[in-house]
Image: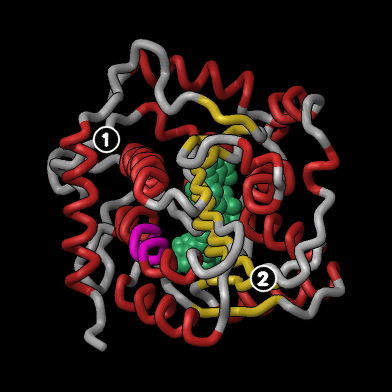
Amino acid sequence: MSIYRNTVWFVKGLQEYTKSGYEAAAKHFNSADLEVNLKGRSFVITGANSGIGKAAAQDIANKGGTVHLVCRNRERAEAARDEIIQQSNNQEVHVHIVDMSSPKQVWEFATGFTQKHSINVLVNNAGCMVNQRELTEDGLEKNFATNTLGTYILTTALIPALKQLPDPRVVTVSSGGMLVQKLNVDDLQFEKGAFDGTMAYAQNKRQQVTLTERWAKEHKDIHFSSMHPGWADTPAVRSSMPDFHAKMKGRLRSEAQGADTITWLSVSTAALSQPSGAFYQDRKAVSTHLPLASTRPSTAEEDRLLKELETMAHKFKPST
Ligand SMILES: NC(=O)c1ccc[n+]([C@@H]2O[C@H](COP(=O)([O-])OP(=O)(O)OC[C@H]3O[C@@H](n4cnc5c(N)ncnc54)[C@H](OP(=O)(O)O)[C@@H]3O)[C@@H](O)[C@H]2O)c1
């Protein structure tokens, strides 16, 4: 952990990631950007039963889009679906049960989904910060399995379907927390040294940013973006970062404020004039590195990340 990076990042966060940071940025938003009719467009949003993902799902349903909520818990997912339908009066809101930390479930979902449905936009929102080193049934470290491997498999499995429709996009909800981490491909599952859940999470979020940059280079016909929602008051922040939540409570963004840039990247024409592969905060592409932080990976490190994920993903791919 670098004290320099953590300090610079926290000061930046106090200015930009808080509710007041959002309000300052929102003065420059163009409200017309979100005046769109999404009827006939299909959106897949992971972790959409709560927090920022649910707020984005609500926004998109309000605008007439077909929304597929990809969640791990049926009860919570159906409650969210009912609420979104009730508030939007849009019946095209559907539930799919998938544990994103299970590579096999993610593969099976992607295959089954593309046989029955179309997809214009994928929002990789599901995420977790597990503070102890826990393993999934498959023996994978849980943060890595959910945040990195699950995102990797879902995205690569859906890319062919995305390419079949006009204006395809992939938005990945990363975190400004990734700024404190340099890509580390030597220990993807945090087997070495003392385990720190916050740093494991930040490393996964850095990996998501790298993946987004690489996907954008490889698939020019899809608009890819990663983003930071700011610091929003959600169940994840309350349960995984109770001290941070208690300290920052009155200064955190609402879930809707956190979701604003997800919706903007997913639906606006304005987002398409911005570069594919960039990292966004409050509707603007921003740097993926803090000044003087020495966090830039080499191309060889990026290549290794992709290779390792491809190998792992392949291991869990059901034979057809
Ligand atoms: N809130 C912030 O300040 C903040 C800042 C930076 C980045 N983010 C990112 O924003 C995204 C949304 O988080 P949030 O703050 O809105 O928290 P949240 O309300 O707890 O939402 C997280 C969502 O991810 C789902 N999820 C977690 N693990 C899953 C799994 N294995 N399979 C399927 N779904 C799973 C959760 O499902 P359950 O309800 O079943 O747990 C929930 O729906 C995350 O990627 C997070 O890292 C948030």
- Residue in front for this viewpoint, 205 or 313: 313
* Cβ–Cβ under 8 Å for marks 2 and 1: no
Q: Residue at x 40, y 66 (%)?
A: 154
Q: How is the image coloured?
A: secondary structure
Residue 63 position within the rendered picture, expressed as x and y whole percent measured from the top left: 81, 61
- Decide: is 169 above or below 70: above
Q: Quadrant of residue 272?
A: top right
Depth check, front residue: 217 or 29? 217
Between circles 2 and 1, the one closer to the viewer is 2
Q: Which residues are magenta?
A: 150-156
Question: Looking at the image, which residue is at 48% across and 86% down?
Answer: 115
Q: Position of residue 134 (x, y in %)?
A: 27, 59
Q: CA distance from mark 2 to mark 1?
A: 33 Å
- Residue ID for mark 2: 67
Location of the C terminus by quadrant is: bottom left
| Left or right: 311 in relation to 248 | left
Q: What amino acid is found at the position of numbered circle 2 in the picture?
A: Val
Quick check: is the Cβ at mark 2 less than 8 Å away from ligand 1?
no
Dividing the picture into quadrants, the one containing residue 56 is bottom right
Residue 106 in view of the camera: yes
The amino acid at mark 1 is Leu
Q: Element at badge 1?
A: loop
Element under label 2?
strand
Which secondary structure class fits the magenta region best? helix
Does the magenta portion include 152?
Answer: yes
Rendered position, 225 above or below 310: above
Q: Counting other residues with Cα less than 10 Å from the Cα at mark 2, is it few (<14), some (14-19), or many (20 or more)?
A: many
Q: Residue at x 46, y 40 (%)?
A: 277
Q: Is residue 129 magenta?
A: no
